[in-house]
Image: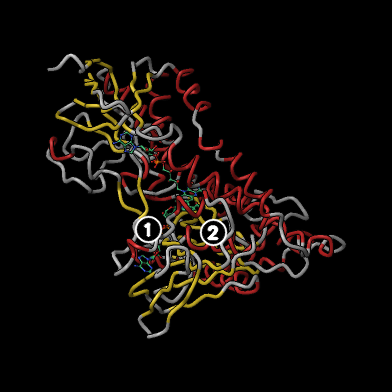
Amino acid sequence: MTDAVKNSAYDVVVIGAGPVGENVADRTRAAGLSTAVVESELVGGECSYWACMPSKALLRPVVARADARKVPGLGGAVQGPLDADAVLAYRDEEASHWKDEGQVSWLDGVGADVYRGKGRLTGVREVSVTGPDGRETRLTARHAVAVCTGSRAVVPDLPGVADVRPWTSREATSAKEVPGRLVVVGGGVVGVEMATAWQGLGAQVTMLIRGGRLLPKMEPFAGELVADALTEAGARIRTGVSAVSVHRPAQDGPVTVELDDGTSVEADEILFATGRAPRTDDLGLDTVGLEPGSWLDVDDSCRVAGSDWLYGVGDVNHRALLTHQGKYQARVAGAAIAARAQGDPLSRTEPWGAYAATADHAAVPQVVFTDPEAASVGLTLAEAEEAGHRVRAVDYDLASVAGSGLFAQGYRGRARMVVDLDREILRGVTFVGPGIGELLHSATVAVAGEVPLDRLWHAVPAYPTISEVWLRLLETYRG
Ligand SMILES: Cc1cc2nc3c(=O)[nH]c(=O)nc-3n(C[C@H](O)[C@H](O)[C@H](O)COP(=O)(O)OP(=O)(O)OC[C@H]3O[C@@H](n4cnc5c(N)ncnc54)[C@H](O)[C@@H]3O)c2cc1C
Ligand SMILES: NC(=O)c1ccc[n+]([C@@H]2O[C@H](COP(=O)([O-])OP(=O)(O)OC[C@H]3O[C@@H](n4cnc5c(N)ncnc54)[C@H](O)[C@@H]3O)[C@@H](O)[C@H]2O)c1
């Protein structure tokens, strides 16, 4: 050991101070366990600075304008372009100008010690932190180490990709100016949200989709309605094509994307929205018998399979790559760590118990903040059938609900509930339409609560709100 190495012992060591790591620390501190949190970049993680917050700040003005354009008497006033500089300034504010003092003081407030630097496992319950000045601190955890290091964007290994300075979600959420032309590769959630934002802010967006539709993990009508609106906004969507190479001959010149159908697309910037990889490649997983670079395989308490001290919480376990779901896992894992530290045999590990993140399997809610919004919870029809449930999909045209017509003229949207015919409960619900994001939690309560349809019949939606779609869905089901 050199003089430069410091040693400290804690009950719990958390690696990664994104929303999930912060919440694990909050829970373990609330249980009276001393807790160290290690962060190599900004306390607050991807969500605060390069994901949820800046992306939603970019989208809010675009979606609000699209909604306002459909309101009689108001539409004419909002036909012009958005003030892009003002939107980018609003985005900067929502990303806290990429400074983390606020979140550091929040962690101080809960009594966790923050260590700046890169955390690495060096053995059982051992973490080494290499600080910005190169100095090392060795942390020992008496009870648990929680790995909450999140995920990073994956860029496909195409010829020329290293030379074109491609955007990932980080650049797409933090860019300082609106590109003239933007190619978006990938039609998942990042792809459609960023295409909506930058098209709305004035870029000419072209989406390159290798499959047949946008938002392939949701009910098919979600991608169809979002594609219609994106096309009406001026974006080009090309399905069934793959990029085979990219090049940018001049440093400040355009990028050209060659496609597998022999055509090419030219743009000023290219965004790869092609999925995520776990941030576990340089984490010392090999020192504890795990594969570097792998997603962490965990049980419902978020404890790594085969370990009695190592937890993987949030994106890094690949159960549901969403902030709210990771924070839910953090509450469950924090409670389980505290109970195990007190020698509790964990009597509530049964599904829906205090120490089981059961909703990860049955009721994950997600809102895609596009025009129109797309929101879902639980299983799609296809997923429910694949899981072996005897189900029936009940659909309703959201345009036929009185509240929708009042929300916007020419409202377009659709709702689906997936009914488990054996138990008469809901396995999943999807809403697509303007203004439906805030409706989703009603569906989450119904799905997570396994509320019998006979009782749901007595949950009366207020008139004339969009939520009256619940009544219409139930009437349709009852025939
Ligand atoms: C563009 C975009 C938009 C999104 N929008 C939404 C949304 O609207 N709603 C939603 O619910 N989800 C959204 N998500 C997903 C959401 O961002 C993630 O699910 C969430 O950030 C995961 O939280 P986490 O704490 O697990 O990981 P992260 O937020 O990635 O945090 C991990 C932290 O660990 C740190 N770290 C990594 N390795 C080390 C190490 N070795 N040592 C020390 N520290 C380390 C990182 O620096 C980081 O701060 C979005 C994602 C993207 C890409
Ligand atoms: N509003 C929200 O809740 C929100 C917003 C953004 C991101 N997120 C989360 O972040 C995660 C990451 O989102 P994402 O969109 O990057 O991933 P994703 O997995 O949802 O979508 C990636 C898409 O890229 C496609 N793809 C992959 N490789 C490709 C290639 N080489 N060429 C062309 N297409 C390719 C895939 O088929 C897929 O459709 C998601 O799990 C999502 O839940 C959530």
In the visual, does 256 lie left or right of 307? right
Residue at far right of view: 73
Percent across and percent down for residue 201 are 64, 60
Q: Earlier in the sequence, mark 2 or mark 1?
A: 2
Label 2, ligand 2: CB separation under 8 Å: yes
Q: Are marks 2 and 1 in contact (CB under 8 Å)?
A: no
Residue matched to label 1: 275
> Residue drawn at (39%, 49%), measured in percent from left and top?
320
Percent across and percent down for residue 455 are 58, 49
Q: Is residue 51 visible?
A: yes
Percent across and percent down for residue 94 are 59, 40
Per the rendering, the mark at residue 193 is 2
Judging depth in this view, the residue of 52 and 39 nearest the camera is: 39
Residue at far bottom of view: 262
Name the amino acid, label 1: Gly
Label 1, ligand 2: CB separation under 8 Å: yes
- Quadrant position of residue 408: bottom right
- Quadrant position of residue 203: bottom right
In the visual, does 222 lie left or right of 43? right
Q: Is residue 286 above or below residue 394?
A: above
In the visual, does 355 lie left or right of 443? left
Percent across and percent down for residue 300 are 31, 40
